[in-house]
Amino acid sequence: QVQLVESGGGLVQAGGSLRLSCVASGSIFSINVMGWYRQAPGKQRELVAEITRGGTITYADSVKGRCTISRDNARNTVYLQMNSLKPEDTDVYYCNVVLRPTFGSHRYWGQGTQVTVSS
């Protein structure tokens, strides 16, 4: 089992920045991928960015050049630095981890943190 606690969401004006943090606890040795997804009401949850244990990073096209994902394995924490925010970035952001295949590649989700970008 892995527990995830997110922080850093809030209200920001367009063009501003936010930094999301997610701390993992529990069976942290089993974690492979850490990342962020977002979801608007009535829409599917979509990937924002993710980073593997080995450091391979994937970004959604919509955030490339504006967001930076990083991971501190010693602190069991993944960060998402979001710059040049746009109103269309308004969503609930969810931290996600995927366990290593040895542990069944299970997914765990945080409770979500609201990001609101005003125009």
Image (cartoon, rainbow, N blue to C red):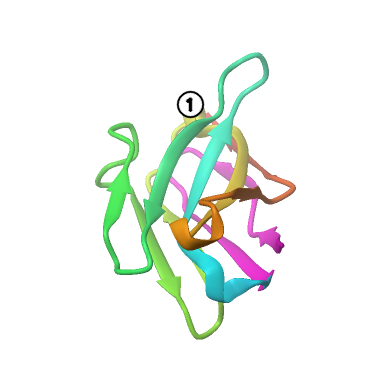
Judge whether 45 appears above or below 18 on screen: above
At 63% from the left and 69% from the top, the residue drawn is: 23
Q: Is residue 50 magenta?
A: no
Q: Is residue 94 left or right of residue 79?
A: right
- Furthest residue toward bottom: 74
Q: Is residue 2 magenta?
A: yes
Q: Quadrant for residue 61, please give it.
A: top left
At 59% from the left and 29% from the top, the residue drawn is: 39
Residue 52 screen position, x and y as percent: 36, 61
Magenta: predominant secondary structure element?
strand
- 44 or 114, which lies in front? 44
Residue 85 appears in view: no
* Neighbourhood count class around disc 1 (C-alpha, 10 Å): few under 14, some 14–19, many 20 upward: few
First to last magenta residue range: 1-25
At 46% from the left and 49% from the top, the residue drawn is: 16
Residue 10 screen position, x and y as percent: 67, 49
Q: Which residue is mark 1?
A: 88
Q: Secondary structure at mark 1?
A: helix
Q: Quadrant of the N terminus?
A: bottom right
- 45 or 16, which lies in front? 45
The amino acid at mark 1 is: Glu
Residue 115 screen position, x and y as percent: 62, 42
Residue 51 screen position, x and y as percent: 37, 58
- 85 or 55, which lies in front? 55
Judge whether 50 appears above or below 61 on screen: below
Residue 61 appears in view: yes
Q: Is residue 89 left or right of residue 115?
A: left
